Structure formats: structure tokens, C-alpha cells
Image: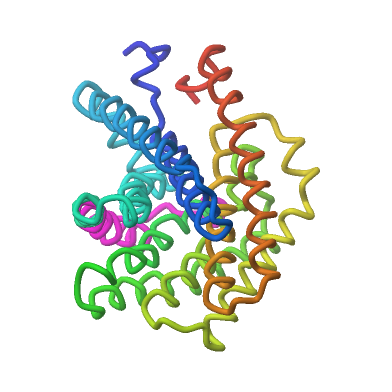
Amino acid sequence: MDKSNRLLNFPISFFSIILGLSGLAISMGKMEAIFKLNVNISLYLLLGTIAVFGVLLILYFAKFIKYRDEVRKEFKNPVKVSFFATISVSFLLISVALLDVNLVLSKYFWIVGVIIHTFFTYVIISFWMLHPNFDIKHFNPAWFIPVVGNVLIPVAGIKFFISDISWFYYSIGFVFWIILFSIFIYRIIFHHPLPEKLVPTLAILIAPPAVAFIAYVKMTGTIDSFAKVLYFFALFLTTFLLREFKMFSSIKFYLSWWAYSFPISSITIASVLMFSVSKIVFYKYLALAFFIILVLIVLILIPKTINAMKCKEICVEE
């Protein structure tokens, strides 16, 4: 088998790009709304995101057809397996982005996303629990991706079906977030540091509480004490990780750099929601600050990714 084959080495983590792009599209839409901008940039960002998502789906499906054993190998890898949930999370995020564009299309994306994510949730959790050769060094923040998907489901789902369905998935995601976060703290303090390639995934820590806050407010319609705990913990994690900017920026470019984008979009959208409900102007401009950071991140990531593809630094044997 030709190990230099680009399709053979096409990584499942490529779908993390869609999380970043869809998060940017949603965030742009929120900025257009709260600042009453008479533009529709978010729609073009969304269409571009859907187009890129379609291309990635075709490429990975082609890999599955032609190199099925390699896909199975990825799925059995304790580090890579969680990235499979980026496919279903992509469907769910596009569904959220479509809520104000086309409700019917949003519902279809949501249903597909829920079906796929339910499958991945059961299979991945089963894999975690029954895998005989796990080591604590295998644990990394990418394990939070399936969790984020479950707390993301209610954001659009509360509009489509009875609230109990949304609460079912929210409960799964929230409880497993607490469990995995505890394991993460133990792993990061008492064991070897993350490999350089996975250091950018530390940003994923922001997403579970930020998305959990958004979903909770969508389901309850209020910002109570519990919602504030979720938001301010996400805000703490964001400011804590932004403080480590020099460490993150000094790392060689990997596809994992896209892990910076979606979490920042999550706290941006959460801050917009804080402003929309509380009417406290501070959150409006805090959201704007995060949005500017998000745009700068994506403007750095896109050319770096394209350049890495041209230089054949991506889709190569690891």
C-alpha cells in the first residue's frame, strides 16, 4: 500500500475545520444582529462552509470505500476516535447556522446530525469503557468533542421536538463533561504534558461549558444561577488560555490548530446570548472582542492550512 497516497492519509481530524468555519458563520450572524449591520456576510460564510463540508465528506467517503482498513485503524486509535464525532457535530452546527435562514433545511441537518451523533456517542463511550489497552497518556481534550455534540443538540433541537429529547442529550453531555474534566485535570497535573501536536486541543476545554450555557438558556429561557456558573467558568477558561498565547503561537502548525477556532466562537455566541437576555452592554462589547479574535484566528488558519496542503505537510503518513 502506497503510504505517500494523500487520500490514504486523509485524516478524520480534517472535519475540525468545519467546526471552526460554522462557528465563524454563526458568530458573524450574531454580530450582524446585535450591531444591526445591513450586510449578509454570515450567509456567504455559511454557504462556503457547507461547500467545504461537502468536499470533505466526499473525500472521506472515498477513503472509506478504497481504504476501509485504514479507516477502521483510525477508529480504533484511542487518540483519533473522538474526532469522528466532528462529522456529526458539523451537521449540528450547520443546523444551528441555518435556523434563521431556512428552518426546514435546518431541521434536516439536525436530524441527520442527531442520528449520526447518537451512534458515535454509544460507540465511542463503549470504546472508552471496554478498550483493554488504554493509558492515561491517551487522554486529551479531543475526548470532549462527543460531549460537546450532546450539549449542542438542544440548541436547535428545542425548536423541532419536545423538550425531553433535548434534556436527554443535554444530560448525557453535561455529566460526561464533569467526568472527563476531572480526568483531564488529573492527567495534566500528575502525568506527562501533552504532545506538541495536541497542545492546541487545550482550547477545546472552553467549548463544553460555553455550549452547555447556550443550550441551557435556550431550553429554560432564562439566565439563572446555574447558567451563570457555566458562562463564567467558560469565560475563566477563555481568559486563562488567552493568557498562554505565547505558548500556543510558538507551536509548529498542525491541523490541530483549528481547535482554536470553534471554542472562541462558542464563547463569542455565549457572550451575545448574555447580552441579549441581560441587556448588560458590557457583554455586547465582550462578544465583539472575542469575535475579532476569532476572525484573526481564522484568517491565520486558512492560509496556513492551504500552504500546508501545497507543501504536502497534511495528509501524509504520521
Q: Residue at x 59, y 23 (%)?
A: 303
Q: Tell me, yes or no, if residue 140 can be seen here.
A: no
| Spot occupied by residue 15 in the image (x, y as percentages of width and height) | 40, 38
| The N terminus lies in quadrant | top left
Query: Magenta segment: does it hold 8?
Result: no
| Spot occupied by residue 137 in the image (x, y as percentages of width and height) | 57, 52
Instruction: Name which quarter of the figure residue 229 lies in.
Output: bottom right
In the displayed structure, would residue 38 be above or below residue 44? below
Lateral position of residue 229 relative to residue 55, left or right? right
Q: Tell me, yes or no, if residue 225 can be seen here.
A: yes
In the displayed structure, would residue 215 be above or below residue 81? below
Lateral position of residue 84 relative to residue 277, left or right? left
Q: Residue farthest to the front?
A: 38
In front here: 264 or 29? 29
In front here: 58 or 83? 58
Q: Residue at x 24, y 56 (%)?
A: 103
Main secondary structure found in the magenta portion: helix
Instruction: Name which quarter of the figure residue 114 lies in.
Output: bottom left
In magenta, the rendered stretch is 112-138
Q: Residue at x 31, y 53 (%)?
A: 95
| Spot occupied by residue 149 in the image (x, y as percentages of width and height) | 37, 59
In the displayed structure, would residue 281 be above or below residue 125? below
Query: Magenta segment: does it hold 136?
Result: yes
Total marks in image? 0
Q: Residue farthest to the bottom?
A: 225
Q: Residue at x 55, y 45 (%)?
A: 259
| Spot occupied by residue 90 in the image (x, y as percentages of width and height) | 36, 47
Q: How is the image coloured?
A: rainbow
